[in-house]
Amino acid sequence: MKFSIIVPVYNVEKYLAKCIDSIINQTFKDYELILIDDGSIDESPNICDEYLNKYNNIKVVHKKNEGQGAAWMKEGLDLVSGDYVGSIDSDDWVDLDLLERLSKEIERSQPDILVFGYKNVNSYGEQENRLNVESGLYNKNAIKSDILPSLINIGGFQNRNCIYLSRVNKFINRELLLKNRQYYDPQFSYGEDNFWTIPNVLSANSIYIFSDWFPYSYRMNPTSTTHSFHEGLWEKFTELSKVERRIIDDFEKNELCEQQVYNDMVLHAAICINNVMRGKLKRKEAIEEIKMIVNNKDLRRGLKGMNPKICSLHEKLNIFLMTIKAAGLIYFIKKIQYAIR
C-alpha cells in the first residue's frame, strides 16, 4: 500500500464529512484512511462508523479523550501499513489530486519526506502559505545547508521557518517515521507537530519540496491556542523547548538548530502574554505572570537571536518590551489593545 492517512477526530460533526470526502474521492486509490475518534461526545463517532461500513480501506478507532497528539502518535502509528504516512486534521480538507501528485514524485525520486504548502481558509477567503525554500529534491547535504538553518525559527514571528513545523503539510516514509517514534511525546497538547517534523527532518536522507503547491486547506479556528485562554501555557511551552533541545542534541545538530529553539520561545512568550491577558487575573497577578515570562533565562537567549529585518513594527515593539523586562508596560499596552478590539 502506498499511503496511510491518519485523521484525529474530536467533536467535529459539522466538518468531518467534508474532510473524509476529500480523502475518499482522491484520484489515486492506493491508500488507507485511519480515523481516530478521541472520545468525541457529538455525532463524530457515528459519522466515522458510517464511512467504515461503506469503504473497506477505512479503519476506525474509538478511544478515551487524550488529545490530538496521543491520537496520531499512539493509536494512529500502531495501525499504519502504507509506505508513506500523512496526517490531516478533521476540520480541514485536501485537493483531490494530492495523493496522485505525491505518488508521481515518489516514483521519480523516492524521498524520505514530501512537503507541500497549504492555504489558510476563513470567512474572508483564502491565503496561500508558500514554503520559504525552492521546489525540488534535497539530498543530505542540501538539507544541511538549505533547510536545517531555518527549520525552526530564524528570528521572526511569521514565516519564521522554511517548511513549517506543521504535521499536516508532510508525508513521511513509514520506516523513518517509526524509527523516530521514540521522540513522539503524546503528553504535549501544544506544539505536538514538532515531534512529527523535527526528528524526521534531522535524520532524513532526502526531502522533496513543493514550495508553490497548496493542496491542503486549513480551516482557521477561533478557539485555537492563540485565541483562547489555556491554563499553564507558558510552562508547557518551556517544557516543549527542553524536549526539542534534547532531540537536537541526539542528532548532533546543535550548531544549526539549538539557537532556533530559543528564538522560537520569543514567539511562544508573545502567545503566552496574550494568554495571560485573556485570563481573569487581577492586574497585579497578571503583571507577575508577565514578569515571570520575560525573566526566563532561555527567553533572554532567544531575544538575542531575533532578526528585526523580518519582524513587523508591532513585533519589534514586543521584542523591545520583553528585552527591557517591562512587564507593567506590556500589561498596560495590551490592556489598551484589547479595549480597542
Image (spheres, grey):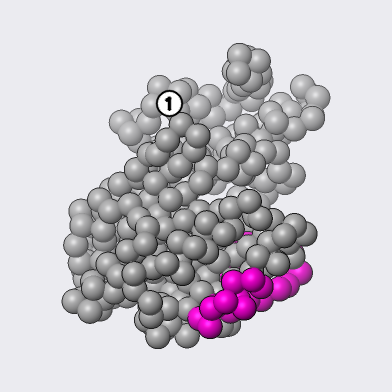
| Element type at mark 1 | helix
| Residue bearing the label numbered 1 | 316
Instruction: Measuring from the top left, give residue 147's x and y in whole percent.
Output: 29, 58
The stretch in magenta equals: 49-74
**Residue 282 horizontal side relative to residue 151, left or right:** right
* Residue under the image location 38 percent in, 77 percent down: 29
Determine if the magenta segment contains residue 272.
no
> Residue 151 at what x, y percent from top left?
36, 55
* In the depicted structure, whether residue 257 falls above or below residue 296: below
Q: Position of residue 15 (x, y in %)?
A: 58, 53
Q: In this view of the protein, can residue 67 be seen by the observer?
A: no
Percent from the top left, x then y, of residue 209?
26, 61
Asked where in the image residue 54 lies, by quadrant, the reply is bottom right
Which amino acid type is marked by label 1? Lys
| Residue at 43%, 50% in the rendered image | 217
- Taking 315 as reference, is 268 above or below it? below
Farthest residue to the front: give it: 54
Does the magenta segment cover residue 59? yes
